[in-house]
Image: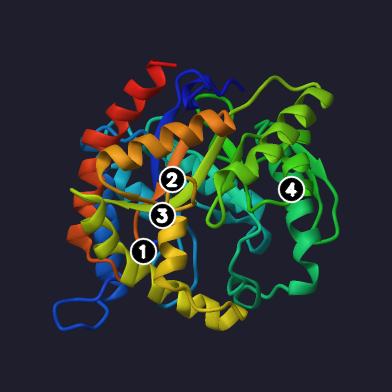
Amino acid sequence: MSYEFLGTRREPTFGLDTFGDVENGANGQPVSQAEAIRQVVAEGVLADRVGVDYLGVGEHHRAEMAVSSPDVVLAAIAGQTERIRLGTAVTVLSSDDPVRVYERFATLDAISRGRAEVTLGRGSFTESFPLFGYSLADYDVLFTEKLDLFTHLREEKPVTWTGTVRPPLDGAQAFPLTESGSLPAWVGVGGTPQSVVRAAAYGLPLVLAVIGGSPERFAPLAELYRRALREAGHEELPISMHSPGHVAETDELAAAQHFPHHQAAFAKIGAERGWAPMTRADYDAMAGPRGALFVGSPETVARKIAWSVRTLGLSRFQLKYGAGALPHEQRLESIRRYGEQVIPRVRELLADD
């Protein structure tokens, strides 16, 4: 299928991603997960209103991230929006069933009148594996086989398929059928060359999760992907980039609002994974001109996005706009500035190239 409407290197599109992070309320305690989900819906509606091209909702199964069923949340947003494309960041295909994933997002595509996408990944969090009865020992084979099945389902024809991680299919077909003939699907990767080559082999667009270091480090992976596409006989396909950030009136205010919540979220995950605590110096380096955090005034963030688009040859940029318990009102303000000020400014900067 053609992916031209998802953006080209000459005319990129701009999105937002969220994990449904649970904010702290007025009493200093986390709001309910139900309230956090309603906040995501409101944020998606605002994103559509201010001209954002795409909203990705991540799947997690943790107390501090409220969304475990992105397709349901996206369907609620679809009913209140008109133009924004709706997808995931990411769907953990390894611990789900490819047939059910395809059918859920094909249903979302119908509800949204053709605005649905799905980004498939192995998942950087592993809670879904024991929750749904899968072994982490099968981490690689689960994703490899299920991605293979999913690519067959995208043809929207009867499928005959055999693997080791789920029962075989013999002439089975997933429903509903999409009006376009196939559901747009991306593969999200964290920097593994094998994952990049696999996405290219299946002819699927790529999302690079740049959450540390510098976007420059991912340039060789972008070129590897394009080379692998050519070698597999595929046309050039979109590359997107997902990175965290926050937009406020000034650089100083953006960092003051974002840092304590980003640091706390990093500390919680880091304690589970053995990472060293994040210092303010670490944060400031990542928020600098070549780092992975897109934090600052609209002009600062726009210039950094434009640089990233040029550096990696991006077709889309996706800002992960929430950070831990960052208040809902600050997230809304960040979305407003991103849509009304950052995106137009990035387009101006790229038009000058």
Where residue 287 sits: x, y (%)? 41, 54
Q: Earlier in the sequence, mark 4 or mark 1?
A: 4
Q: Nearer the viewer, mark 3 or mark 4?
A: 3
Q: CA distance from mark 4 to mark 2?
A: 28 Å
Q: Nearer the viewer, mark 2 or mark 1?
A: 2
Residue tagged 4: 195
Amino acid at circle 2: Pro
Q: CA distance from mark 4 to mark 1?
A: 27 Å
Indicate which disc residue 287 carries: 3
Q: Visible in this render: residue 238? A: yes
Q: Quadrant of residue 183?
A: top right
Pointer 3 local density, CA inside 10 Å: few below 14, some 14–19, many at least 20? many
Q: Earlier in the sequence, mark 3 or mark 1?
A: 3
Image check: 202 left or right of 96?
Answer: right
Image check: 291 left or right of 203?
Answer: left
Residue drawn at x 20%, y 43% is 336
Contact, CB < 8 Å: mark 4 with mark 2?
no
The relative height of residue 88 versus residue 269 in the rendered view (above or below) is above
The relative height of residue 78 versus residue 164 in the rendered view (above or below) is above
Residue tagged 1: 323
Image check: 102 left or right of 25?
Answer: right
Contact, CB < 8 Å: mark 3 with mark 1?
no
Q: CA distance from mark 2 to mark 1?
A: 20 Å
Say which quadrant the N terminus sits in: top right
Q: Nearer the viewer, mark 4 or mark 2?
A: 2
Residue tagged 2: 289
